[in-house]
Image: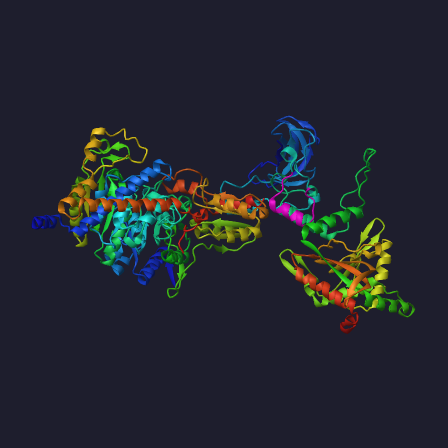
Amino acid sequence: MSQGVHIPKLGLTMEEATLLQWHIPSDGRVDKGAVLLTIETDKITFDVEAEASGFLQQVASVGDRLKIGELVGYLHERVGQSSGAVVGVPSLAPTPVPAASLSAVPTAQSAHPAAMTVASSEGGRQLVSPVARRLAQEHGLALAQLTGSGPGGAVLRRDVLAAAAVQARAPAQALTPPAPDSPPAALSAQRRPMSAMRRTISQRMMHSLHSSAQMTGFGRIDMGQAVAWRRALVERETDLGVRITYTDLLLKACACVLRDLPEINAYIDGDDIVTLADIHIGLAVAVDGGLVVPVLRHVDRLSLVGLAQQREQLIDRARSGKLLPDEMSGGSFTLSNFGSYGGDFETPILNAPQSALLGIGQISDEAVVREGQVVARPMMMISLTFDHRLIDGALAGRFRSRLRELLEQPALMLARMR
Amino acid sequence: MTSKTYCWAIIDAMREEMERDSNVFLVGEDVGPAGGAFGASRGLHKAFGPLRVRDTPISEEVIVGLAVGAAMTGKRPIVEVMFMDFFGLCLDQIANQAAKMHYLYQGMFKMPLVIRTNVAVEMGIGPHHSQSLEAWVGHVPGLKVLMPSTPRDAKGLLKSAIRDNNPVIFIEHLALHRMKEDIDDSEELLIPIGKADIKRAGRDVTVVATGLMVHKALEAAKVLAGEGIELEVIDPRTISPLDMDTIVESVQRTNRAMVVSSAHKPFGFGSEVAAQLMERAFFHLDAPVMRVTPPFTPQPFGKGFEKFLHPDAQRIAAAALDLMR
Amino acid sequence: MARRKQAASKSLGLDADQGLKIYAKLVEIRQCEQQLNTAFAKNLFPGYIHSYQGQEACAVGVCSTLRDDDCIVSTHRGRGHYLAKGMALEPMVCEMFGKANGICGGRGGEMHAADPAVGILGGNGIVGGGIPYATGAAYSAQLDGSDRVCVVFFGEGASNQGSFHESLNLAAAWNLPLIFVCENNLYAEMTPFRDTSRQTDVAERAHGYGIPGHSVDGNDVLAVRAASLAAVERARSGQGPSLLELKTYRHGGHFQGDPCNYRSREEEQLWLARDPVQLFRAIVLDQGWQSSEQLQALEAQIEAQVSAAVDLALRSPDPDPAEALRYVYAD
């Protein structure tokens, strides 16, 4: 048990004292009755004696001006113990308290996790309130990294919310420095710490899966017309100044569908549904060591050429690690092309907090039936992952069928293009 | 609108219901010409005559029994049991007979019975005239238990109780008898049974309080508001069936709960609220549910003891602060 | 000869029709008790069984003086009262076996059967528990200004409960149309009444409350009937309550399985010799209302009816356990 050392009341009119001198160093052993420190009031100089034996932890410093009862240090049973909990006036309950003294109640402690050292609870088990545990999970925060300001060092709601606010301000920062060199690994396995990017990806993936109800629906699209359109545009590459890709076509088509189905350009925040007016689409880009998602802005308002130009610049900067934080945020939808590495269909993971993500596979010739005949057509599978909390199967189905419509008859996109 | 006391609100409720339905009658000790031991039936004997407002002998068991039998045979009796401390004398008729008639006989008998009684907490009368025993009757399936804390609530709930086809224990507080509130006489004031009332909204702590404690909690809330702490004070009004939906919704917002009651802590009303909050709002609790009650002793005679034993606004405020640590 | 018989009938206060009805009811109750006791011994009857065997004249004598709109409140030993007041045999027997088609859906069982249509306001598991609420049923009649009456049955053991005394006092003070009928079978559960009461004539207690009290031979159905008629007439005409004490005897123990070590065999033999059913049978024959063969035929018919009711009950379905969640509150 640790005992607090407080400024004593030395006279009727005394209000504060100055700490003149510590007689025992921090971690020094002191016997009960020995002089711990000297304080000075407006009237006298006074030696404060230790009320118990123990090892001193100094909290206040020489020269500090302190009020009556204020904590200046601790006497611990064992050397090296530390107490982080702030204890000022002893607890008010259960004795009746006159109204005036209620203002002397200790205020809620600072919620800055970095400023607190965790009081070690008995048995070393971290105390977490039920709501704090739930909120930590919702915000994707690891409990082990939270410090508690509640009784016994318990992690409370305010601690989690404060940590979440800190995280929100600096989303891309690495959370902890890499672990020091680990001892030589066993021959059958190799161990190395994750890079900051890998750690971020890993946390974001888990957070995404834990914070929404993700389902993936598939579709098959006859890309015949789209292929023809694209070939025509590629032939005019010099005139246009940029090489139009399938990604560009898909981006544009998605933007058209999102304009028609604004319920998908939305996300859940707490108990609210936030529907976004602007259509900004993230594009998953593989880079050295991982994956980044630059965001193309106002996809619905750009021409195909404008879209392609923006796409080229962003991918360039992504691959050379020069993307700005603003260029990686603010998306309302994401497109992922796994056809580029030979995939057909997958169940992509949502880019939280977005509610939908479209994955496109490779375009390859397949045997299909048209008017009773087996013919070869260039087919592409689409994989639409959606948050089932917000988007029901029928709505997701409408997205896919609308997209199919636009890609199988691209003229429809032209009809509605601004 | 007239300013009515809690006591007159109760008289008004009975008079209106007796005018409306000739099957309603009132029996109890001193309820007739004397107008009630606490004046809670003044004017009724004159208005409705000696058969419908009748004095009984001091025989709690048969007084309640009479009401049970009358209720089984088409009447809607109101019984006054002077102090809730006397329930021990008539618990068989309440818990074994009234509460189970409809159930045992598969609905062949209805039991539209109201037992009005008084909890005399903090009146300084002594150990046999001071107990808040809602836990005794809240524990019996088939009974409904009400505990209004204001004149409006008393009137509206008593009218609803009289119209209810179940045995209802209507618990009044002597200490609130002179409390005043504006009531519109022309309004048919019916307050639903089983619906809590948020007497004061707040974001920091959910305080569930009953009877006299509602007012002390509101006082505590005023004190703490000056410190920037906002209590939400919920008056369940109905002890059983308890409106946990309102309480749970509140705790989902505040994440902290306490129950303030004049009854004892062990096996008491607060235990029920705490258990249900564990079941329904566990993942919203930032601290354990706290119960603020007098200590577990009988109530000795005199105001000095009473003041020491019973929570007041200061103790409630201090407890709320403790909860917020 | 015929005129003498007619005169005798007149003094009995009964004609052949009424007499036969009474006899049939006595037999029905006796058959019911015998067959249910047998079922109990075969472990077919759930819970306890509190047999009414030997006390039939009490229930029949009293209830034969009541109308359908009069009501009765019974005890834990209620089958005699239920049948005498007009509860239908089959639903009653099914209720005894706790079946879904019992008169209370099998929820009440032996001690809690009721039929408000014929004024049966239930039995009770609490000794003396029904006496207080019988006052309320009587008060309803008074409030309505009707001439309905209420009869509450109880044993001499209950006459020591506070509820008995409070109810007698209230009924007397308020002049309620309530008839208190004490079936004194000399033993409260397994303890002789004389060991727990100084005043063993329950009727005498009435005087303490200012109302008439009469002690009657409970095995003589006509005596019971006569006393009851007088009490009912008093109540109907607004003269208030009475207490009837019917001295009788249980043929079996407090409950089946009770070895009755607290009674002497001599005492039992004495009372068995005054079997109420046999006593009235003799009167029926003596009055010439039926011949011996006719009576035997009637008895056989009733035995068969009861047997059929028991068979029906044994074949009937148990209630759906989920029914236990219903009827806690009325709408």
Instruction: Give residue B207's position: percent from left, percent from top.
Output: 51, 49
Residue A305 appears in the figure: no
Q: In this view, which residue lies farthest toward the top?
A: A31
Q: In this view, which residue lies farthest toward the bottom?
A: A415
Instruction: Give residue A357's position: percent from left, percent from top.
Output: 74, 58
Q: In this view, does B202 lie above or below C188?
A: below
Q: In this view, which residue lies farthest toward the right?
A: A238
Instruction: Give residue C249's position: percent from left, percent from top.
Output: 22, 37
Instruction: Give residue B285's position: percent from left, percent from top.
Output: 58, 46
Give the color scheme: rainbow, by chain, secondary structure or one colour: rainbow
Q: Is residue C75 above or below residue A24?
A: below
From the viewer's side, name the closer residue of C3 and A348: C3
Q: Specify whether residue C34 is painted magenta.
A: no
From the viewer's side, name the closer residue of C328 and A418: C328
- Total numbered labels: 0
Residue at figure coordinates x 76%, y 43% from the top left: A176
Q: Quadrant of residue B3?
A: bottom left
Q: In this view, which residue lies farthest toward the front?
A: C293
Q: Quadrant of the C terminus of chain C?
A: bottom left
Residue at figure coordinates x 34%, y 39% from the top left: C39
Magenta range is: A126-143
Residue C319 appears in the figure: yes
Q: Specify whether residue A129 is painted magenta.
A: yes
From the viewer's side, name the closer residue of B310 and B109: B109
Give the left or right position of residue A71, taking residue B137 as reference: right
From the viewer's side, name the closer residue of C307 and A59: C307
Q: Is residue C91 above or below residue A309?
A: above
Give the left or right position of residue A254, taking residue B114 as reference: right
